[in-house]
Amino acid sequence: MVIQNNNPFYDKNIEILKEAILEVESVNSIYEKSVGIKREEEFLLPQERFLYGDKSETIIEEYGKRFFVNIVKGQKTGWFLDQKENRKIIKNISGEKCLDVFSYTGSFGILINCEERIFVEKDKKAVEILEKNLKLNNIENYKIINDDAYSTLKQIVFK
C-alpha cells in the first residue's frame, strides 16, 4: 500500500494513519511517497519511506493480465488506480494495431486486444517495468519507442 500525503495534519499523525490501515487491511508494506508541488505549497518536506514492512515490488493482476509494480521506483504510487475504469474499457477494444503513448507500465497496450503494439515512453525506468510486463503477459509483437511522446507523435502524424 502506498500513502501519498499533502496535508500537515496527516504528517503529524502518520503513525495513527498507519495503525488504522493495519487494523482494517492486511498488507505486506505501507510506503509513504509524499512528494511534489502540493507538499511544497503546504511548506512540507518531501517524505519517501517505509512506514511498515519493506516490500517494494509486487505483481498484481487486473482484468486477466499481470503487472509488475515497484512502489519505490515507480511513478507516483507505482500503479494508477484512478485509471482502472479506463483500463476496463480498453480491454474490450480490439484492432490490428494499437498505440500506447505515455505508456509507463504498458497497461493500456497490454490490455487491448491487438496484433501489433507500439509503446511510447520517455522514462527509462518506466521502460524497464514495461518490458517486464510484456514478458509477464507473453506479448511478443511490439515496439517500444523510448523518446518524448510529443515529438514522436509529430513524426508519426506528419510523416
Image: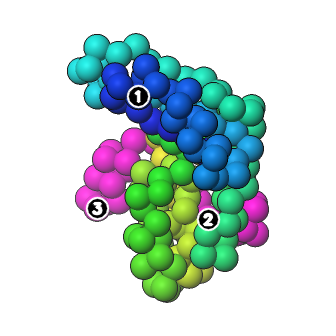
The location of residue 109, given as percent across then percent down, is 53, 67
On whether residue 139 falls in the magenta region, the answer is: yes
Image position of 118 with respect to 9: above or below: below
Q: Amino acid at mark 1?
A: Tyr
Task: Tell me the number on the disc at residue 10.
Answer: 1
Q: Dot 1 lies on which element?
A: helix
Residue 151 visible in the shown view: yes
Discs 2/1, front? 1
Q: What segment carries the magenta color?
A: 133-159
Q: CA distance from mark 3 to mark 1?
A: 46 Å
Q: Is residue 98 above or below residue 143?
A: below
Question: Where is residue 51, by image quadrant?
Answer: top right
The answer to the question of whether label 2 and label 3 lie on touching residues, with beta carbons closer than 8 A, is no
Q: Label 3 belongs to which residue? A: 157
Q: Quadrant of the C terminus?
A: bottom left
Q: Residues within 10 Å of mark 1 (few under 14, many from 20)?
A: few
First reached walking from the N terminus: tag 2 or tag 3: 2
Which amino acid lies under the numbered mark 3 shown in the image of this protein?
Answer: Val
Kind of residue at badge 2: Tyr
| Residue displayed at 35% across by 59% down | 156
Q: How is the image coloured?
A: rainbow
Residue found at x 28% / y 52%: 154
Residue drawn where x is 55% and y is 62% of the image: 107
Q: Position of residue 128 (x, y in %)?
A: 66, 43
Are the two marked residues, 2 and 1, in contact with CB atoms closer than 8 angstroms? no
- Is residue 6 rendered to the left or right of residue 119? left
User: Is residue 94 or residue 67 the one in the foreground?
Assistant: 67
